[in-house]
Image: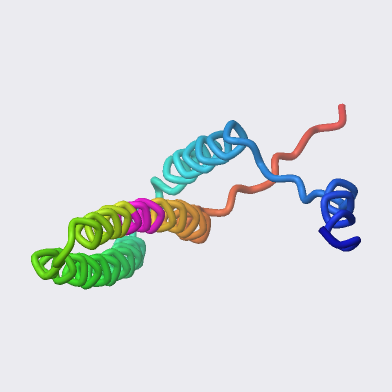
Amino acid sequence: MTHADHALPHALAHSPAIPKPSHAQLLGNLATRGEHNFGASLAMLPALAHTETWLSLTQLQAASLQKLMAQQDGWLAQWQGWLHSACQLSQANTVSKLLEQEVNLTLRAVQIMGQQAVDLATLQENLEVNYGYWASLHTPAVPAMQHDAD
């Protein structure tokens, strides 16, 4: 090891850490968004009598569906590539090559499934945030409560 190699762990140990949210915080954020969106949905009930509200909700849903369909197109392309690779397994001429190809194929399938899960979670979070914003735009303004100074 060189002198720089010894310094690296020491430097990393003393570098300022960026705080990362815990799993509980992330789940709490999810619950908070859901609670906020539920409240926003209730608050906007009077707006549901207006056609414009329904039209803009339909636009939000259509945009969400387009995003999901684009994700599915990508996933299908990835699985087609995976299937093409799977068909190449029979071309291995040694057991070691066959094993290498099978392991690579398995890892690729896990990677594709993992990316699909991440894509769906990202889409869900985006939908929650977008819906909350949309609902806030369609919530009637609540007049400020006046307190009598008796």
Q: Which residue lies furthest to the top in this view?
A: 150
Occupied quadrant, residue 38: top left
Q: Give the range drawn in magenta.
A: 111-120
* Dominant secondary-structure state across the stretch colored magenta: helix
Q: Measuring from the top left, give residue 103's x and y in whole percent.
A: 28, 54
Nearer to me, 10 or 69: 10
Nearer to me, 61 or 126: 126
Q: Is residue 73 left or right of residue 64?
A: left
Q: Measuring from the top left, give residue 109's x and y in whole percent.
A: 26, 56
- From this view, report whether residue 26 is shown above or below residue 10: above
Q: Is residue 102 left or right of residue 134?
A: left
Occupied quadrant, residue 21: top right
Occupied quadrant, residue 8: bottom right
Query: What residue is shown at x 51% (from left), y 53% (from top)?
Result: 140
Residue 130 within the segment the image draws in magenta:
no
Query: What residue is shown at x 57% (from left), y 53% (from top)?
Result: 141
Q: In this view, does 60 lie to the left or right of 3?
A: left
Q: In this view, does 131 lie to the left or right of 110?
A: right
Nearer to me, 148 or 69: 69
Q: How many marks?
A: 0
In the picture, the quarter occupied by the C terminus is top right
- From this view, report whether residue 131 is shown above or below residue 22: below
Nearer to me, 94 or 132: 94
In the picture, the quarter occupied by the N terminus is bottom right
Q: Measuring from the top left, give residue 35's x and y in whole percent.
A: 50, 36
